[in-house]
Image (spheres, helix red, strand yellow):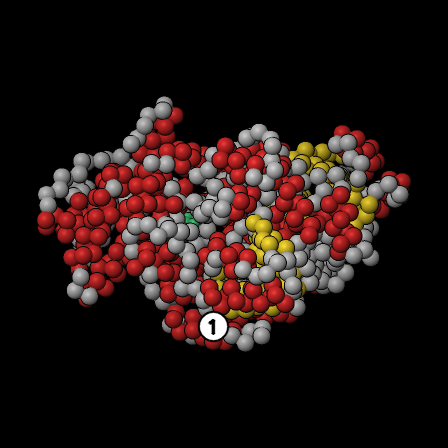
Amino acid sequence: MTNSNREIFLDKIATKAGRPRHQLKNHPFVPINDLPESTLAGKSQDELLELAQKNSEAVHVTFEKTNRSSLSALLNDFLSAKDINNLILPTCDKWTTFGLSDWENKLVDSAEFWAPESSRTENLAKANAADGAIGFADYLLAESGTITVATTPGQGRGFHFLPTHYLSIIPKSHILSRSRQAMRKYEAAITSGRLTTSNINFITGPSNSGDIEMVLVVGVHGPLDMTYVVVEDL
Amino acid sequence: MTISTSDKPFLTRVKESENDHFMQQSVAKAQDAQWDKRTAAREELGNWEQWRDLGEQIRQHVIKYLPDYLEQFSDNVEKKGGHVFFAQTDEQAVNYIKKIAKEKKAHRIVKSKSMVTTEINLDKALLSLPETSIMETDLAEFILQEDNWDEPTHIVFPTLHKNRDQIQNVFKKLGYSGSNDPEEMAKFARKYLREYFMQADLGITGCNFAIADNGMINLVTNEGNADLTMAIPKTQIVVMGMERIVPSLKEAEVLDNMLSRSAVGQKLTSYCSFSGPQVNGESDGPTDFHVVILDNGRSNALGTDFEPVLQCIRCGACLNVCPIYRHIGGHGYGSIYPGPIGAVLSPVLDGYEKFGDLPFASSLCAACTETCPVRIPLHQLLIKHRKVMMDKLKMDHSFNNVLMKGAGVATSSPILFKIALEGAHMGSAPLSKSKETSVDNLFNYGHIEKAPSIASGWTDVRDLARPPKHSDDFRSWYKKHKKEQQEGVSHD
Ligand code: SF4
């Protein structure tokens, strides 16, 4: 059934528009200006960090800066401050990258993991039961206070939306100026085959709604609050 | 075609809206708040006019090569294992979606906010399936559903016309026993909807932009319900207007920024997601992924002067600056697409017979055109609609009737007439006139030489007072209204 109707549909709209089909290859899109690239260009990583903090806090994010040696203590503080009893963690090799292998190992029996070998139902049930999640972001966008995450087998879609409290760890070197820079990196990773994913999320603070009398309510379907932890790695 | 939200005549709807003081206050409050937020967000970005140039260019380019981009997109969806159905009509779209729901034996359907599914009346069609329940999961749409499927009043803030007490009463029917505090009510909705979500077997979403070169769809939201809709059910059906397409992730990213700033004054909304069918190794997300691409009257605009209406990214900014919308709200328009964009789009989709009044529900102040992030010349398209109606009906030998209709719409409602008089001078520079405006050109402002004069039909039979000179521009008018509102001055 797929596309049996496609040609009729496309021919019809081409006729209505009075423009023949299959002209695009000779007229690819060439942007009229380079604003997406040039806006906020040329900032140092320290400047981006400062901007990221300002813009993250403006969207109700708790913003922390730390280094590898202090990271595990900061995570423990988060768990006790939020009174988290059902924690979910991703399955990935970043624990080692951030020097958290020991910390993670200690939690193996008490925390749940989003596990590649678990079924859809199991992983979603674990995330839904979790009152806290600690995960890893790919990038942090300074302009908007946005973390970006591509879905992986060890850190699925529901991981970011079902738990009540959410903490994301980002290396300082992965702070980018804007969404354009992140898009370029994702496009390159997908094209080269380094990244296979069905889904990329740009997440800017906790979920919110103004649907009741335009009063801002923070925390609707997604996490009620967000913490970003930027780890010095430069 | 079900974009119509009322069987009542336009002027009856306007009259009802005039009496809905809570709605008027809410709209005014929303417009004022959004004005400040939107302006600040655009100023902070900088070079807003050049961003508009880029936004317009992207949208014009994809409309120009629409069949090619749709072909590329559908090829890429299929490469990922998804399915694409091209629906020329609402009926074809609904039948396809019902067929999938039946095949999948879907019993619990979750939906995230989508104007296009409202346009095709999908909820009602799916509810006709045996043992099937459906849940709108966007907080506003959930409220409307539980309030006996009340109609939305704004394309971004659908429940603008409801107050917290009304919403509390709606929730009481679901077992809510808390206060009318928005936060407490939102928490109740979260819990209520989460239980439903976890059992859902079919998810239906709209689509802000389809990415032609990789087959992903892009959704821009604030609550997180759309992402749960794309994560939990095994099957996802995306319903999109055929014009909602961009070349690549890069252009999606540009438009997401412009949409977020224009719609809600945010740099980016809480969730901008780029998504497709599950890939190997992942455990959630749809294993069965369908995209329904809908024409349903959109192609009426192609190759005509109305083609720019297809550039729309549904940010709602034109509603948020419109003096007519401020007074009559969404329900006054009688279309699920209200405000200036609705007044242009509704007749394109569903004809003049149903929506021929709407192009007259405008002061032609051009505030909509000025704010549109993708530079749709909205007020000029409204004039064009009037001209087309004139020409068409002139040939039908019923010219005088339509003249009277146009003048009638404006003059039968004190509010519309008042706004029209004030708005006649509110236009931006290219439309401004040095001499006093007469009612003769109120509705053809700036194009008087070309467009037939509607109001001449009126003045043929009756003297009409020359409107007072009104030298304020739109912003002066807006500031004055805001100030008066703060001081509690009643306007009507
Ligand atoms: S017409 Fe322009 S301002 Fe109005 S909703 Fe569409 S994009 Fe936004």
The percent coordinates of residue B314 (x first, y second) are 46, 51
Q: Which residue is drawn at 39% across and 49% down?
A: B338
Q: Is mark 1 within 8 Å of ligand 1?
A: no
Query: Could you tell me if residue B35 is visible in this image?
Result: no
- The residue furthest top is B487
Q: Residue at x 22, y 51 (%)?
A: B406
Of B214 and B144, the residue lying toward us:
B144
Q: Report the residue marked by disc 1.
A: A10
Q: Which residue is drawn at 22% across and 52% down?
A: B405
> Is residue A21 placed above or below A49 in the rendered structure?
below
Q: Badge 1 local density, few (<14 within 10 Å), some, or many (20+)? A: some
Going by the numbered disc 1, the residue's amino acid type is Leu
| Chain at numbered mark 1 | A
Quadrant placement of the N terminus of chain B: bottom left
Examine the image and state in which quarter residue A133 appears. Answer: top right
Task: Tell whether B431 sits left or right of B156.
Answer: left
> Is residue B111 placed above or below B324 in the rendered structure?
below
Examine the image and state in which quarter residue B419 appears. Answer: top left
> Is residue B75 placed above or below B114 in the rendered structure?
below
Of A120 and A56, the residue lying toward us:
A120
